[in-house]
Amino acid sequence: MRTVDLITKKRDGGELTKEEINILIRGYTDGSVPDYQMSAMAMAIFFKGMTPTERADLTMAMVHSGETIDLSGIDGIKVDKHSTGGVGDTTTLVLAPLVASIGVPVAKMSGRGLGHTGGTIDKLESVPGFHVEIDNEQFLELVNRNGLAVIGQSDNLTPADKKLYGLRDVTGTVNSIPLIASSIMSKKIASGADAIVLDVKTGDGAFMKELSEAEELAACMVDIGNRVGRRTIAVLSDMSQPLGNAIGNALEVREAIDTLRGVGPEDLTELCLTLGSHMAVLAGVASDQQAARKMLEQSIANGHALEKFKLFLSAQGGDASVVDEPERLPSAKYRFEVPAKAAGYVSSIAAENMGLAAMLLGAGRATKESSIDLAVGIFLHKKVGDSVKDGESLATIHANGESVSDVITQIYKSIQIQENPVNPPPLLVGEVK
């Protein structure tokens, strides 16, 4: 069947067969299906959608377009976690050593970030000497020995998805639930996990700003995972304000260390305990959520989680002394306070604008070629619902330059204060299983 016939079929609301999807994705990967035809198909999917079977078939076609990671050499049930992203999202840095400390093997493939701040690897590279340039054999050996390792994403993992994502970005077809879900799940499945826990964000700083859209995406991804034999659950969490207090790479590492010590922000701690409980149950190391949570809380209290983080850092060349001496992490030259202009209560903190403020400092990448300043960022002293005195600091700017007027303007634009008390938004807004 010709590619144009497949486009026409989908345009008219037809259901593509597994064989047709495989032919399409193989052709697009090897170049025999040109960009203009794949653009037409993406637009047809955007308007007509895909059935659950089509979504699963598309996901697996993209999985098989490149190499896959075989984690069978690692003992136990491997559970991966994925967040749809946000501002101050430090969960992996806390969650990976936390669940590894109670026996959940974590073989994590991560990338570098575009946007507000760096990705997980950028944050970890704030630790002097830490690196992810290890081969697959060493990767598996580290997970078996220490319970945890992080490696960079392979260039040949889901190449069809990489091509299609780039095409969607310039053809107005990014916001398609079937294409988003298959893109995310293809990478998770190709990475070799037995089970997957998804943290789907909603709110101002999230990709899916409306709860209904986040719920639809979560349900779609969970369905794909379960259809292809990966036990999958999703937690929906709030991103209407930044998660935690730190926005910026080294600042977030410090916050992760505090959280593993048991003195981190309440929202970050709660989210990590919730996600970690699901991971522990899926991995079979706990019988239910309540038992898993107790195990995780005890691991923080007795210091095992923090020791696992030290072991993880040193095993990949990092200076683990930063855990006890966080001043050894990259530190910005200047600090500027942002005082409140009136007393009252914080009514909102626009997460996306706060992320853009951090980008102005150099904490994130506008393009893949952009360089990141690991030391800079913003530390919030107030969250939604907190009381504020006139002149009290709302945030501290960590900068390597003295010109931060644009950043200050952005922060004032982001943080709203009102006279009457405000209830903070709920952190956890739903689950999909």
Image (tube, helix red, strand yellow):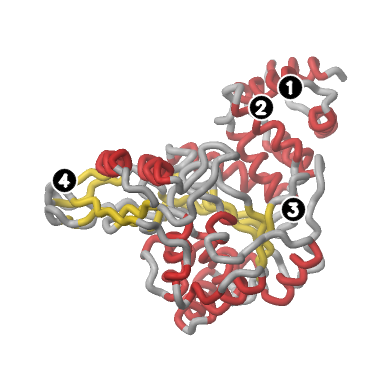
Foreground: 156 or 175? Answer: 156
Marks 3 and 2, how far apart at CA: 29 Å
In the rendered structure, which amino acid carries the disc numbered 3? Gly
Camera sees residue 178: yes
Q: CA distance from mark 2 to mark 1?
A: 7 Å
Q: Which residue position is annotated with label 3?
A: 229
Q: Quick check: 215 above or below 163?
A: below
Q: Position of residue 229 (x, y in %)?
A: 74, 53
Estimate the spatial distance between the alpha carbons at disc 1 and disc 4, rounded to whole Å.
51 Å
Quadrant containing the N terminus in the rendered view: top right
CA neighbours of label 1 inside 10 A, class few (<14), some (14 to 19), many (20+):
some
Callout 3: few (<14), some (14-19), or many (20+) C-alpha neighbours within 10 Å? Answer: few
Secondary structure at badge 1 equals helix
> Which element carries disc 3, helix, strand or loop?
loop
Residue topped by disc 4: 418
**In the image, residue 411 lies at what x, y percent?**
29, 44
Question: Which amino acid does the dot numbered 1 rest on?
Answer: Asp
